[in-house]
Image (cartoon, helix red, strand yellow):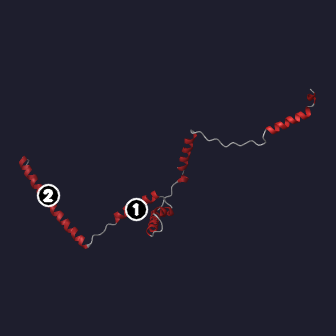
């Protein structure tokens, strides 16, 4: 029991052991992943962010649309690039290109009707005259049949 009287060195040993067991810097944990129930809420917030005024799609004027369509067509006809590459260089999506092209061409087709040539015009006039004669003959024939039927039924 002689050791009980000698407390000094033993206490020093115990404190050094305690210092050795506890690390000076704690290890940092990475943040835990949220549970699946929280993911739909996050997706809803992303949708709301997409609908915000800052995320409005760019609108182009008719002149800008026509200019981009012409630029794409000239690049394709000159053989500089493929259709997809030309669309990308114009800065629009493929779907936008096809929508613009679809809406631009019917307007051109409606406004521009090819004028018939001299021979075609004469043929057209002749066909219209013949059509008018046939209509008159058909109307006369129907009137005659109508009167015959009225006489048979005794309506006249």
The location of residue 87, given as percent across then percent down, is 48, 62
Query: Closest to the observer: 34 or 133?
Result: 34
Q: Is residue 2 left or right of residue 48?
A: right
Residue 35 found in image quarter: top right
Label 2 crowd (10 A; few <14 / some 14-19 / many >=20): few
Q: Which residue is drawn at the image coordinates 51% and 63% (left, top)?
A: 89
Provide the secondary structure element on which disc 2 rests. Answer: helix
The location of residue 52, given as percent across then percent down, is 54, 50
Q: Which residue is drawn at the image coordinates 53% and 47% (left, top)?
A: 47
Vertically, is 86 above or below 44? Answer: below
Q: Which residue is drawn at the image coordinates 43% and 59% (left, top)?
A: 98
Query: Closest to the observer: 29 or 93?
Result: 29
Label 1 crowd (10 A; few <14 / some 14-19 / many >=20): some
- For the view shown, which residue lies furthest in the bottom direction? 118
Q: Which residue is drawn at the image coordinates 37% and 64% (left, top)?
A: 108
Q: On the image, numbered disc 2 is attached to which residue?
A: 139
Foreground disc of the pair 2, 1: 1
């Amino acid at each position: 029991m002689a050791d009980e009287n000698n407390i000094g060195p033993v206490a020093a040993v115990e404190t050094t052991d305690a210092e050795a067991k506890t690390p000076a810097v704690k290890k940092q944990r990475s943040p835990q992943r949220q549970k699946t129930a929280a993911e739909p809420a996050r997706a809803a917030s992303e949708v709301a962010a997409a609908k915000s005024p800052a995320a409005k799609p760019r609108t182009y004027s008719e002149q800008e649309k026509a200019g981009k369509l012409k630029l794409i067509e000239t690049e394709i006809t000159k053989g500089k690039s493929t259709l997809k590459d030309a669309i990308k260089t114009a800065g629009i999506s493929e779907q936008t290109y096809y929508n613009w092209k679809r809406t631009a061409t019917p307007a051109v087709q409606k406004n521009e009707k090819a004028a018939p040539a001299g021979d075609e015009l004469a043929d057209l006039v002749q066909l219209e005259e013949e059509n008018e004669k046939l209509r008159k003959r058909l109307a006369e024939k129907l009137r005659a049949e109508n009167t015959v039927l009225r006489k048979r039924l005794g309506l006249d």
